Image (cartoon, grey):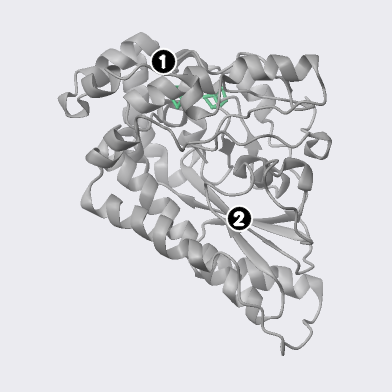
Amino acid sequence: MGKVDYEKSRRIVRRTNGNNPYSPLFMERMTPKAKWYFYMRTKVLPQMRDADVNPRALPTRDQWLDSDMIKDMAKELGADIVGITKYTPSIMYQDVKIKDHKTVIVFGMSMKYDLMVDIGAESQEEVHRAYYELDEIGVRLSQRIGAMGFEARTHPNVGDFPLPAYGYLAGLGEVAKHGSLVSPELGSSFRLSAISTEMPLEIDGVQDYGMDELCQKCGICERFCPGGAIMPEKREVAGIVRWHVDSDKCQPYFSRLYGCKICLSVCPLTARVPDLRSNYKEMSKSIKTAKDAGGMMKMIDEKDSLNTEAFDAIPYNPEDFGGPYISKARADRDDKDSSIVFEDDKKN
Ligand code: SF4
Ligand code: SF4
């Protein structure tokens, strides 16, 4: 199966979350810790996204040395995986101003699998924790790069580009059938962030980990997705052929399940991760009992803590998220000059 040539991608319009009618319900259900993570991520850290550049910095030594040093720093600050790729404007959202940056440092942090699979408030707290810690790493590392005399900008989850695409280009894994990056080290249980910079760094190439062949044969995420949002085959989106998740089918269940993560939780590649192997055993029992998406939803509905009635009372309207996904995607195929709406970057 072929590699995904993101350089041939057309720039896409980002889906907006501004009118999301489910947001107040999400806020109501947030734990106090999740609220603090969210406050830091939205009100404090964004002020420091762009590094202060030191005008008196000495020239750096050589590219190899700097690349290893940057990766070591990211890990020392808490990242579990780090890769570097070149700055690729073709995958930046259309409304983003292209900078004169050369490279992108992509880094990931594992999520505690047992918390992630337990869909509900604690699971969302774990998502906010991972994103908050990644944002902190991004800001600190950007500032260090700025101190070395180079412009650097942190790109958190709701940033300037879809993070899984950059994670793939940086060799951290492959974008799998469920639309998220799968890493050989962390399976599907992790989140991503990135920094773009004008610092020249040695880049890591994309890697073929055999995900395409595995996903063709597996299809577990597709079988257990309650919205039927995961497409069985790759398709052309914005000029490139890749796995695709239909946002308009995902979003209602994503809201109803207070941040659905079923597709990430059931992915058996997580069972290959040494630290998570034993936790996945419990999930495999649930998969066996539930058999399909209907069975899984029944198991989840039996958990009374989710209280989905309030979400069910709000009908899903694609206009609240910037318009219907599918019709715009079709229009894009008919008119190559028009824009396309991508799924939002809600997983990794
Ligand atoms: S988040 Fe849930 S609804 Fe969305 S694609 Fe994954 S399993 Fe399907
Ligand atoms: S669950 Fe299976 S098909 Fe889905 S991403 Fe994981 S390996 Fe691929």
Considering every residue shown, the one lying at the far left of the view is 304
- Residues 279 and 94: in front is 94
Say which amino acid is labelled 1: Pro
In the image, taking residue 314 as reference, residue 304 lies left or right, namely left
Q: Is residue 73 visible?
A: no
The secondary element bearing badge 2 is classed as strand
Q: Does the residue labelled 1 lie within 8 Å of ligand 1?
A: yes
* Residue placed under numbered mark 2 in the picture: 194
**In this figure, which residue is indicated by the disc labeled 1?**
226
Residue at figure coordinates x 31%, y 15% from the top left: 297
Q: What residue type is labelled 2?
A: Ala
* Ligand 2 lies in quarter: top right
Question: In 3D space, how far apart are the residues under numbered discs 1 and 2 (Cα atoms)?
Answer: 30 Å
Query: Can you tell which quarter of the image residue 86 is in?
Result: bottom right
Label 2 within 8 A of ligand 2 by Cβ: no
Give the residue at x 45% y 24%: 251
Q: Which of 156 and 275 is in front in this view?
A: 156
Quadrant occupied by the N terminus: top right
Q: In this view, does 13 lie above or below 206?
A: above
Q: Position of residue 254 (x, y in %)?
A: 40, 26
